[in-house]
Image: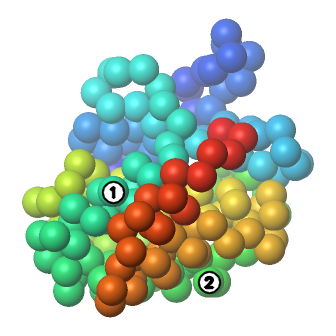
């Protein structure tokens, strides 16, 4: 992954990305949001296609595919992400340096390289997924400290007797973004 200052714009050039996380096939963009002073808006693009807003259902389906390939390692990965969710704090700043530190410190903390075998399953690689999920988690907690949807999806995915319909219902909940 390469990290750089934002160059991408949205809203007819009005909003410029704060930071960009560049992977082999994807780029994640983080923009200033409008819900609060430190709100962020997360967007991503694959191989030059149009910019999309990530939804919880995107990563949840990918995790389910990884579980089909290697349940044990995916559970371990999800438990590490759940720890990130449980310990992440609302943003106190959303500048380049803060967001870069959030991701780099988090990657060291979960030792992302141990999960690389999961890249053989699903659409997203584990580093992309980690960055996306860390940003979604901190976004949710920044705008609503009592937020729960992200955490609920992870908990449901970790259930031994997963209820696929409940997971898809929770992950597919329509919100503002």
Work out whether residue 164 can be spotted.
yes
Badge number at residue 26:
none
In the image, 61: left or right of 172? left
Farthest residue toward the bottom? 160
Q: Position of residue 166 (x, y in %)?
A: 47, 68
* Nearest-to-viewer mark from 1 and 2: 1
Q: Is 72 in front, or is 115? A: 72
- Separation of marks 1 and 2 at Cα, in angstroms: 21 Å
Residue at which label 1 appears: 61
x then y, percent, for residue 15: 71, 24
Residue 134, percent from left and from top:
53, 64
Q: Residue furthest right?
A: 37
Look at 51% across and 47% down and name the residue there.
55
Q: Nearer the viewer, residue 38 or 98?
A: 38
What element does badge 1 sit on? helix
The secondary structure type at the circle numbered 2 is helix
Mark positioned earlier in the residue sequence (1 or 2): 1
The answer to whether residue 101 shows anywhere in this view is: no
Seen in the picture, residue 22 relative to 172 is either above or below; the reply is above
Left or right relative to 104: residue 38 = right
* Position of 37 relative to 85 (above/below): above
- Viewer-proximal residue, 64 or 97? 64
Query: Where residue 84 appears, x then y in whole percent?
Result: 54, 78
| Quadrant position of the C terminus in the picture | top right
- In the rendered image, which residue does mark 2 sit on? 86
Residue at the top extreme, as displayed? 12
Q: Nearer the viewer, residue 82 or 15?
A: 82
Quadrant of res 113: bottom left
Crowd class of label 1 (few under 14; some 14 to 19; many from 20; radius 10 Å): some
């Amino acid at each position: 992954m390469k990290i750089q200052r934002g160059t991408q714009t949205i809203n007819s050039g009005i909003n410029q990305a704060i930071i960009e996380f560049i992977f082999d096939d994807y780029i994640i963009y983080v923009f200033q949001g409008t819900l609060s002073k430190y709100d962020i808006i997360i967007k991503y693009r694959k191989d030059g296609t149009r910019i999309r807003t990530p939804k919880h259902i995107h990563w949840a389906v990918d995790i389910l595919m990884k579980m089909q390939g290697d349940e044990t390692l995916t559970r371990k990965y999800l438990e590490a992400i759940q720890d990130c969710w449980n310990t992440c704090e609302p943003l106190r700043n959303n500048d380049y340096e803060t967001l870069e530190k959030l991701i780099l410190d988090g990657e060291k903390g979960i030792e992302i390289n141990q999960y690389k075998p999961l890249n053989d399953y699903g659409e997203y690689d584990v580093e992309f997924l980690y960055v996306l999920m860390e940003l979604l988690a901190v976004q949710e907690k920044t705008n609503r400290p009592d937020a729960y949807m992200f955490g609920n999806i992870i908990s449901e995915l970790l259930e031994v007797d997963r209820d696929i319909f409940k997971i898809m219902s929770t992950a597919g909940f329509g919100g503002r973004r």
